[in-house]
Amino acid sequence: MYQLTRVCKPSRARLVHLGIGIRPPLPRHLPSRLLSTNALEPPKPSSSRPQIPTEPLPRSRLLSRILLVAKYTGLAALSSTFGILLLGAGIFIHDAFTYTNKDVHRVPVLPLALHPEQGGPKNLPIVRALVDDVEDDEAKKLLDKPKLVIVGGGWGAISVLQTLSPGDWHVTVVSPETFTTFTPLLPSAAVGTVQVRTLVEPLRKIVARLRGHFVDAKAVDLVMSERLLELETLTSTGNPKNVYLPYDKLIIACGSTSSTHGIQGLKHCFQLKTISDAQAIRRRILDNFETASLPITTPEERKRLLSFVVCGGGPTGVETAAEIYDFCQEDIVNYYPKICREEVSIHVIQSREHILNTYSEAISKYAEEKFRRDSVDLVTSARVSAVHPDHVVYTVRAPDGTITTHEIPTNFVLWSTGIAMNPFTRRVSALLPNQVHKKAIEVDAHLRVKGAPLGDVYAIGDCATIETSVVSHLLELVDEADKNKDGKIDFEEFDFMVARIKHRIPMAESQLQKVRTLFDLYDSDADNSLSLNELCKLLEEIGNNITALPATAQVASQQGKYLGKKLNQLAKKREVLEANGIHDLDEAVSKTFRYTHLGSLAYIGNAAVFDLGNLSFMGGLAAMYAWRSIYWSEQVSARTRFLLMMDWIIRGVWGRDLSRL
Amino acid sequence: MYQLTRVCKPSRARLVHLGIGIRPPLPRHLPSRLLSTNALEPPKPSSSRPQIPTEPLPRSRLLSRILLVAKYTGLAALSSTFGILLLGAGIFIHDAFTYTNKDVHRVPVLPLALHPEQGGPKNLPIVRALVDDVEDDEAKKLLDKPKLVIVGGGWGAISVLQTLSPGDWHVTVVSPETFTTFTPLLPSAAVGTVQVRTLVEPLRKIVARLRGHFVDAKAVDLVMSERLLELETLTSTGNPKNVYLPYDKLIIACGSTSSTHGIQGLKHCFQLKTISDAQAIRRRILDNFETASLPITTPEERKRLLSFVVCGGGPTGVETAAEIYDFCQEDIVNYYPKICREEVSIHVIQSREHILNTYSEAISKYAEEKFRRDSVDLVTSARVSAVHPDHVVYTVRAPDGTITTHEIPTNFVLWSTGIAMNPFTRRVSALLPNQVHKKAIEVDAHLRVKGAPLGDVYAIGDCATIETSVVSHLLELVDEADKNKDGKIDFEEFDFMVARIKHRIPMAESQLQKVRTLFDLYDSDADNSLSLNELCKLLEEIGNNITALPATAQVASQQGKYLGKKLNQLAKKREVLEANGIHDLDEAVSKTFRYTHLGSLAYIGNAAVFDLGNLSFMGGLAAMYAWRSIYWSEQVSARTRFLLMMDWIIRGVWGRDLSRL
């Protein structure tokens, strides 16, 4: 605490300068010390090391370090005071000149945009023109460009939009939410460490760069033969009204929903996929603490209200548990009856043997250790069998195989295990005969939806999965490789075939290292050639060994970037290629998609873990700040980046906001 | 625009420094200029006037002024960069040391708090102890202090809480909302000029200073004989569960609701009294623009969706209309189809002849002029007769008295005219026989509820009104004044009586300037003395001429402050006074309440107006900033003050947030 006093005081002291004025002491507020004038001096030229304040005090290295920081913290607050005030002046001028009296009169609108024709299988209005298609010259220019329609506004969609170069496509984004969300920080938003508004950026601002259009609607169906996307829009009275939106290219990037695993009563659970999820969780958590503080709440009821259950030991579950712990430890304890803090219990129920099981073992261990120290209740190798309004039932399999059933009384259950298709994706894959995958739309290595007209429809992110079955390509492969048409594949032919497989299914590459061994292994009759049967077995085996890409933001945005680049290329070369009668344009303009894993990270309560493939890194505050700075740099706009910085500072100075709204 | 370029660029340029990085040009974004190295120099000692940048340019006074500001704006952003980063470092250290591992174990709790006894007229649990009453020594100390219960968390309640000195009272705040709201900025929040979170401060943080308690409940009834306040709390299942909260002193400060004036279909209207009102309005406005942008919306429907109707030309109505106008002018026009901006129409329907009719005439005129320039449709001397889901009906009375009926198709109606009692206040005044007032609880000049046991129950703010009837005191007054008991009041006696009236009803003072004239005027039989009849007429007349205090934040907080000071006095002197058998403690420790009007202000769209009693002041940007700084200084906490500053800066740099959530 001693260092604490020395360190924090200046920053508060300067806040007074800032004209912000400190309230009478809150619990987290600290006694006044160290108002040494040094802190008020202007910064020395960066070279000279600043002096330690003149007042006599023990000369420990640590202490002087801290004083050093203290001083700069002081300077910090001081200069930011100065800065903010002057910036204010800047805004003043800005306001003075930007307060536009723009007159908007007689905006040109295409008649077709006001009175769309009817048509399509369901004879709905077909939106061939939008109201802002001809409002100015820039917009007009895009009219004759091919129509690119993007369904969804998540990671995939955004990275496409940010990669596309303006002027090539007539872009329309379709989403029921008017903004994109920085999902990795949802757990922080759920307890108010950051504000929800910090995590969102309006899609209209993002498409503005491409002079694109935004339609506030839900995609519900697809007519591939006529290239019509069916949208459900809502009238002002809230009634659905469907329309067709024509497209030349369609990108499906509408994400996923949580999978239920067929559990009873998931309606009693929270999810954490959207902003409104985070808001609902926040309200419930504060509700629970308020109700627990009521004078008539029984001890049993209080225990139940303050037990928080997280189903799923993946990053989302773990981070949410950690944030809830932080919230109790840093804020609840200061402002709610202490009995409430005492009665809090946090439970994480994980089906595998370890939490964060997709991370390196060291990381799982570290995280589990941290949680044990924080007395967070970890239940591993357990399956939730039912969720009731007031308690959760789960079964645990002991190492000896015996299964026991347990209950946790609770008023908060977060469900964060696995993903499933949302209605639109389910509909799309139902339309396609050869879509076998259960959890997502299957796409080829070019991210084209399998079975859709070639190059018309793409799918990226959580709603898509790249095909891993090699055997389905057996015939083409043999056709290509079997030079002497003897119906058998000798080694040279196989060698060539392997190259083709690698090209078609890049993810199979790891399985195709030792060609010779593979060949001999499956050449059961040792006639130095593979019969179709032998080949079939081989390819099947390879397919089964390929692991699909995880449903992460990282995959989605890499796919989006890949697609964006490709579309830029297509815009340039399309005409020439088509003139030359080239059929497979994707093949012609770009390689197949390859995913490079940049590592995974997770926040585990004033500490963080990083899994960078072979190297893994974990630690306390420093790691946490590394975690923060990575997310900070990932922000979609300058605005959100600024807001995020502010949120962290505000949380540091004043703690989290306890208002339930 | 030329100055604009010179001026705004630096602030943006530095934002890049700030590591914030600018997105590809948004419409409001500006070409790069003026990166003169001057802007990078450290600030000169305040005395010397800074030089104009060296690059040659026309030496107009205005220009050099602008350059001067530009330079400082540059410095501003630069230093705030520096500041924020270093502040970040400060927070880092702060985090390092404040991440508590506080263990909370075996918190002492009174058995009575866990198992309250039943009792009272309705035999409900009586909360004689709270769960945090004995959790530490500080809390224990307050146990034997008199119980002060405050109903509500608005302006009145907050200023009581901020005036009370800690340690004197066992304070409990009862409110269904866990936070207090800075109501004057709700219109800004309704369009996202400021964030809702900026306007709220958790009540728990405010009562923390007094080690007070907060109960998340709604007051529903009162048992004055047993000093029990009946609360409705909600269980985790959402079912109401009522309890009694005992009090020694009760302060009712639970505000008001909007009065309906018996209009049909007010359920289709928005109000603007709470945060959730503001959020709902914001969502509706954005909904309207999104639906209006949909390709299938008909021109008529678009017109309806984009017509915004405000009923009531008081400050709230006017400011909301102005904010909506700003929102369209500054943000909508940049990111939504221009046709939407063109079709927007804003209507203000006012019953009186002028808007802002409580302000000086000059101000009304100024505001009306401003609105005309912005082509905001002002409808004065008009009454709304009905509100339908899709249109508003109102009647206008022409100067010649003829009444015409009109309709406005709309999808947004704000109702901001007059106030009415909320259920609890209605219940309270129903309990008291002599409560005649229809709109609020009547209190005496000491703010004590009339008819309640003397000094037990106070009421302040919108839910209270100070009695203005003098004649109801006739008998006491005569009793006091009629020295010679001749049943008549001669002039000396009347002179004394006047003093007593001024004391009892300070608001009557203005009516009692010319005592002699008054006396002669009502001494109809000119017998140089007033009979009871004459006196009765006189007093009645005086009462009728007193205008009640307006239902404003200013009145509420002055009353709260007054009450807080009085309670501090009572805590000190109570015992002595009671020992001396003094009955009327309020009388003994403090004067009656006197309201001093500090002026009213209103924002009218990049301009503001101030009515300071006899002096009134109005103007553009400068006035707007005066308006801002007044509200800024009024903020309840350092946190909200900082957030407000940030909101204005963010709005200045990036515009308002368009995300609908």
Image: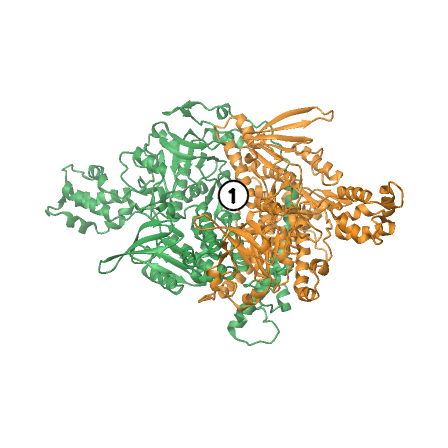
Chain colours: A green, B orange
Q: How many labels does the image show?
A: 1
Rendered position, A375 above or below A546: below
Whole-percent x and y of residue A595? 34, 48
> Mark 1 sits on what residue?
B24
Of residue A19 and residue A211, the one placed in the foreground of this image is A19
Q: Which of B587 and B655 is in front in this view?
A: B587
What is the crowding at mark 1: few (fewer than 14 residues within 10 Å), some, or many (at least 20)? few
**A559 or A567, nearer to the observer:** A559
Horizontal side, residue B305 vs residue A593: left or right: right
Task: Locate residue B286, reporting x and y percent.
Answer: 53, 37
Q: Which amino acid does label 1 sit on?
A: Pro
Q: Quadrant of residue B250?
A: bottom right
- Tell which residue pokes out farthest to the front in this image: B486
Residue B178 visible in the displayed image: no
Q: Mark 1 lies on which chain?
A: B
> Quick check: A45 above or below B539?
below
Closer-to-camera residue (B454/A390): B454
Evaluate whether residue B218 shows in this view: yes
Q: What element carries label 1?
A: loop
The x, y position of residue B338, in whole percent, is: 56, 32
Q: In this view, does B577 lie above or below B265?
A: below
Height in image: A634 above or below B347?
below
Please indicate whether residue B383 sits to the left or right of residue A636 in the image.
right
